[in-house]
Image (spheres, grey):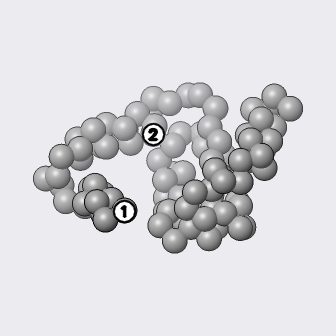
């Protein structure tokens, strides 16, 4: 937990910045597959505003599933999210 803040890239000279930029470029210009995003509306770290910005960087990303009672670990709402994802991909 204490180490995590040191892993977040905040300075252009930090290790991993080049890879992060390449990943953004890929998701924004090369990705053509299906995308599903679930946002924990109570997430204090990657909440609605951060995820909205991320969504603009993923080509073709539809509006997210908003999980009102979801926090940072939104996957804890697994069944609800899994069903929504399957439905989004036409598998249910």
Residue position for label 1: 1
Q: In which quarter of the image is the C terminus?
A: top right
Relative to the observer, which residue lies in front, 83 or 73? 73
| Quadrant in the rendering for residue 82 | top right
Q: What element carries label 1?
A: loop
| Quadrant in the rendering for residue 66 | bottom right
Relative to the observer, which residue lies in front, 6 or 62? 6
In the rendered image, residue 32, in percent from the top left (x then y), is placed at: 56, 28
Question: Is 47 placed above or below 16 here?
Answer: below
Residue that sits furthest to the left in the current view: 13
In the rendered image, residue 77, in percent from the top left (x then y), is placed at: 71, 54
Question: Alpha-carbon neighbours of circle 1 within 10 Å: few (<14), some, or many (≥20)?
Answer: few
Residue at left 33%, top 59%? 4
Residue position for label 2: 28
Q: Seen in the image, is 34 located left or right of residue 12?
A: right
Q: Seen in the image, is 69 located left or right of residue 11?
A: right
Nearest to viewer (mark 1 / mark 2): 1
């Amino acid at each position: 937990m204490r180490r995590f803040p040191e892993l977040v890239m905040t300075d252009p000279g930090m290790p991993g910045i080049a890879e992060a930029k390449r990943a953004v470029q890929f998701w924004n210009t090369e990705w053509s597959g299906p995308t599903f995003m679930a946002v924990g509306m109570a997430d204090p770290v990657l909440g609605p505003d951060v995820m909205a910005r991320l969504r603009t960087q993923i080509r073709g990303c539809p509006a997210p599933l908003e999980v009102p009672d979801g926090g940072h670990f939104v996957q804890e709402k697994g069944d609800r999210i899994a069903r929504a994802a399957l439905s989004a991909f036409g598998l249910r």
